Amino acid sequence: RYGLAEKEDQVGVVTGLAWTSVGGDLLQIEALKLPGKGRMKTTGKLGEVMKESIDAASSYVRSVAPQIGVKPPKFEKVDIHVHVPEGATPKDGPSAGIAMVTSIVSVLTGIPVRKDIAMTGEVTLRGNVLPIGGLKEKLLAALRGGIKTVLIPAENEKDLAEIPDNVKEGLEIIPVSHVREVLPRALVRMPEAVEWDEEAEEAAAAAAAKAAIPGQGAVAH
Amino acid sequence: RYGLAEKEDQVGVVTGLAWTSVGGDLLQIEALKLPGKGRMKTTGKLGEVMKESIDAASSYVRSVAPQIGVKPPKFEKVDIHVHVPEGATPKDGPSAGIAMVTSIVSVLTGIPVRKDIAMTGEVTLRGNVLPIGGLKEKLLAALRGGIKTVLIPAENEKDLAEIPDNVKEGLEIIPVSHVREVLPRALVRMPEAVEWDEEAEEAAAAAAAKAAIPGQGAVAH
Amino acid sequence: RYGLAEKEDQVGVVTGLAWTSVGGDLLQIEALKLPGKGRMKTTGKLGEVMKESIDAASSYVRSVAPQIGVKPPKFEKVDIHVHVPEGATPKDGPSAGIAMVTSIVSVLTGIPVRKDIAMTGEVTLRGNVLPIGGLKEKLLAALRGGIKTVLIPAENEKDLAEIPDNVKEGLEIIPVSHVREVLPRALVRMPEAVEWDEEAEEAAAAAAAKAAIPGQGAVAH
Amino acid sequence: RYGLAEKEDQVGVVTGLAWTSVGGDLLQIEALKLPGKGRMKTTGKLGEVMKESIDAASSYVRSVAPQIGVKPPKFEKVDIHVHVPEGATPKDGPSAGIAMVTSIVSVLTGIPVRKDIAMTGEVTLRGNVLPIGGLKEKLLAALRGGIKTVLIPAENEKDLAEIPDNVKEGLEIIPVSHVREVLPRALVRMPEAVEWDEEAEEAAAAAAAKAAIPGQGAVAH
Amino acid sequence: RYGLAEKEDQVGVVTGLAWTSVGGDLLQIEALKLPGKGRMKTTGKLGEVMKESIDAASSYVRSVAPQIGVKPPKFEKVDIHVHVPEGATPKDGPSAGIAMVTSIVSVLTGIPVRKDIAMTGEVTLRGNVLPIGGLKEKLLAALRGGIKTVLIPAENEKDLAEIPDNVKEGLEIIPVSHVREVLPRALVRMPEAVEWDEEAEEAAAAAAAKAAIPGQGAVAH
Amino acid sequence: RYGLAEKEDQVGVVTGLAWTSVGGDLLQIEALKLPGKGRMKTTGKLGEVMKESIDAASSYVRSVAPQIGVKPPKFEKVDIHVHVPEGATPKDGPSAGIAMVTSIVSVLTGIPVRKDIAMTGEVTLRGNVLPIGGLKEKLLAALRGGIKTVLIPAENEKDLAEIPDNVKEGLEIIPVSHVREVLPRALVRMPEAVEWDEEAEEAAAAAAAKAAIPGQGAVAH
Ligand SMILES: [Ca+2]
Ligand SMILES: [Ca+2]
Ligand SMILES: [Ca+2]
Ligand SMILES: [Ca+2]
Ligand SMILES: [Ca+2]
Ligand SMILES: [Ca+2]
Ligand SMILES: [Ca+2]
Ligand SMILES: [Ca+2]
Ligand SMILES: [Ca+2]
Ligand SMILES: [Ca+2]
Ligand SMILES: [Ca+2]
Ligand SMILES: [Ca+2]
């Protein structure tokens, strides 16, 4: 059962690329945002390295929250669940990092991910994209699955020499070196940045709290 | 000891289908809703993959809560316990996913599950139904156990060619590709959706809180 | 050292039946209710399956709390400790389920358990009783230990054909298929049900809270 | 290095008896009560069975708290640390149960334990004393260590036939079947029971709380 | 893929030096400061010894907080995430200790780390620098990666005799024996110390709290 | 790399003595006190027995807090981090117990530890000092490292017969049987005891709390 591209643009749903001993495959990544307390849940028989890559993706997103239109306190009021179907298949490795970032940004902003794009690349805490293995197998799987555009790490560009011509002709292959090159291509539109000045917010919060203190409202005697 | 269909429609009780080295069997799934704090407990010697499938089922249900008539804050006030008897038999795998979704929806809404239906299918965080193994053995177990209707993943429809005619004649076999095709068939009636507008709710909550603040009630001097 | 029946009716003390490679034995189960926060502690070198059977027993009891005269908020104010002496002997398996239910109901209600009754049977989250193994060895141990009455799963009734006549004559053997057949026989008296209407309770709680708010009591100026 | 009896009566310090492949030995048990939150800490390379025996001892003591002069809310305000020196030697087994009970009662009440008494016996949640192994080796170690009185389980009384006469003459050996026979012999004096009526206490607590509510004190206008 | 020096001075990004069976390499260390509750997260397939070295680095930094311009309560309001890419490569050992200190100080103060410096050295809780292994391989990797300055433990100075001349000529090698020699070289500027007198702070906090108490503000009747 | 005595008297820094298959060595123990919540952190690749010895040391110190000038509530406001460099070397065993006690007392009181003293001895919860192994190797390491005074367990005094004369002449060797003989020799000065009467403190705390209650201050109408 080979993976196929999604049929519609969806929020939180990103297509990654997996490389195993039997070849490449598409990797559907799903994320949900739920009312909660800032917890991150991950399921899908994920190994420790993949779980850590989700942690790194999540911290990166938190660190750029205002740039994607999310005020930081939001993170304390939601739980995020990242799931990688098919649940019986073990998955591991860091190469889904930029897909994880994209999935988390999508659920936080409510902006869908383009259905015909796939991506592979480790992400660092600063949003840098690191090279991955199995490029050839991953591109073949993307082509077979109906993907139109594939984002790959800039450091893997040199490996394109070994890729068959028909694959390179059938896919738009875009090398990226930072998440800021990923999001504009993966999301159907870019989120607008929000002003976030921690001190101003604290002042506002304090004012709101004061208004609610008994005996300090408009009590006339 | 072969499993048999339930004798009455019950809340939280769903019949799944298991496939082991010695053939297929019915899998009774039980769920209870208890006053609590949003905790999920699972018992019945369940493997990690089955536990994760319950996590995914639970998050899916939370994500569609208003559609099934449940206001999201409800989740923070209940604990849900999912148990799969017989407690000494190890169980694993993701294929009970849609049965887990049905069981959780049933206990949250108080709507019973039809007694003569069984189901098999992995569920994703979006409610998609993924294919499973052992279809033949599972259908034989369903027929033997007195089940009338079996929900199977649409992607397994192609495997029906290998199923003996008497089995296909003795069972109503319904392929499904999303949970939204499962619930109307599995529940004795569908829950009504509830309006849920997070901002309106927050306003209401704030108003209620204000009314309770000392010195701001109707105190006449 | 063979187990013997208890010498008096006691609260929280139930006689189960164990089956090991060297035969059957009585299994004393002890429970205590302590002021606490809704925690469950289990000791006695119990395996995972037996611990899960205590979880299932506990959830079943919580789900029928008003029927046994216990208001649900009570559970958040007590800890329950279930211990199975002899602490150096490993114990496992689900067959002490109905004994665990009986023990928990006894400590919660303060109603003693009859001293000359023993019981064996897995319990499900709905209170159904599932069959067990080692019936013959367990009944021999009961007889040897001075037990008068043994509750067994209805599904094990067919195994009575293989039990020696002297055992069947020396014991009152009662097949049960649900916990509701267990409690009236095991407890020295049945608890009275309590009215529990969640909404009424919430209203009462709110009223009590309001009365305690400063500035809203009977303050005359 | 053989263990020796204590040189003075001390609070929380009890002499147990250990039985290993190389013979018997004294086992000094130490407990401390610290300001805290109801936590129990155990150290001394203790195996799971010995840790569980401390849990059982602790729950038993909590269940009889008013009888030993301790009001139950006290338990939420103290931490208890039970340590068994020599920290590099693994210890396990349930036979130190009654010594653990004695140690915990001693620290809670501040009443010292007699220096020349040793004890061995598993304890159940109800305070019953269960038989132990290695009686001969343990009694030899007690005699060698300068112990005068040894408490043993009543069920081990039959094993005294195999004990050499000089040991039986050199020690006062007292069989016990319940903790209530242990404490009067082990403590230098018995604690006085305290009245504890949960409802009266709740009323008192509520009254105290009310007095502290702003606007309800003696404010004259 | 050999590591290269950073292209710009960045906050929280420090270049460490690793030594493996296949030679030396640069080790990029990244840290982020996020709004939070004083938690420390570490990712990058780190072994226990490296995780402990981050704990020690973190405690050292907390112990000198006012000296680096950070008021201690700050630590309870932020989470720090330390990540060491490449996520699939296991890393261990204590020798990144001073790099960890530098990374944590950089994120807390917002002061960037010089891009062309690398460092190796275990750190103790007092900030002392302990010797490391693989000096030759590490220096070769630094030279190859474009590093200009390397900080090494003073106790490793004696090993410089074995280092090829071209390496010693191509790098500025600076022996250090305490973190206080590391920070002025690694940070683009030194943070200013802040006055921190715990008692004065407590007084200020109490005054602020008092001002917010209802009925004690400037209420005119 | 052999350990050397410290160069100055420092707070929280104590020299222990280790004994391994390759001989004896000095063991620097470092402790820090940080603003916190009563947590204890331990690092340095410590085995379970050494971690438990730190737990025992910590509880002992808490139990004598007023005697060393520390009011018990202090413990709930600080975290203590105990680290044993060199982080890649596994350490275990209980023999650093009295060194751990000394280190914790030093950080809590702020009183430095003498630089030229080393110590070895297991500590019990009551502060008793138990014998250790490897005395000869440990003393050799102390002499080689420039230590002047070594505290050893009184029960090891008999082993001094086997120690070479030059070692005994080069070191002041002091047998101790309780922590109260350790602290006056190890600390540069003894802390002064503080009055601590739990009931008086509670009264004071209650009075302070009352003063802060709105509507009960000096409000004139
Ligand atoms: Ca696939
Ligand atoms: Ca991967
Ligand atoms: Ca079955
Ligand atoms: Ca399955
Ligand atoms: Ca037995
Ligand atoms: Ca059993
Ligand atoms: Ca000994
Ligand atoms: Ca024992
Ligand atoms: Ca590399
Ligand atoms: Ca290293
Ligand atoms: Ca050394
Ligand atoms: Ca040691």
Image (cartoon, coloured by chain):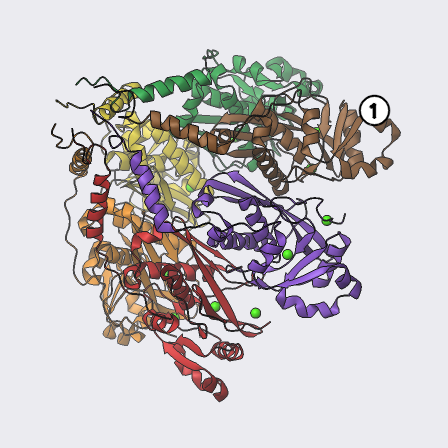
Chain colours: A green, B yellow, C orange, D red, E brown, F purple
- Residues E21 and F135: in front is F135
D133 to F90, vertically: above or below:
below
Q: Residue at x 79, y 34 (%)?
A: E137
Q: Residue at x 24, y 47 (%)?
A: C74
Q: How many marks?
A: 1
- Residues E37 and D190: in front is D190
Residue placed furthest toward the bottom = D165
Q: Secondary structure at mark 1?
A: helix
Looking at the rendering, which quadrant does residue E177 occupy? top right
- Residues B159 and B180: in front is B180
Does the Cβ of the disc 1 residue fall within 8 Å of ligand 9? no
**The N terminus of chain C - image quarter:** bottom left
Q: Which residue is mark 1?
A: E170
Where is residue E191 drawn, in percent x and y?
61, 23
Going by the image, does F125 lie left or right of C177? right
Going by the image, does D199 lie left or right of D152? left
Looking at the rendering, which quadrant does residue A69 occupy? top left
Where is residue A148 drawn, in percent x and y?
55, 15
Name the residue type under label 1. Answer: Gly
F146 to A69, vertically: above or below:
below
Residue B193 visible, this orientation: no
C17 to B118, vertically: above or below:
below
**The C terminus of chain C - image quarter:** top left
Where is residue E62 drawn, in percent x and y?
56, 34
Q: Residues within 10 Å of mark 1 (few under 14, many from 20)?
A: some
Where is residue E26 drawn, in percent x and y?
71, 29
Going by the image, does E25 lie left or right of D203? right
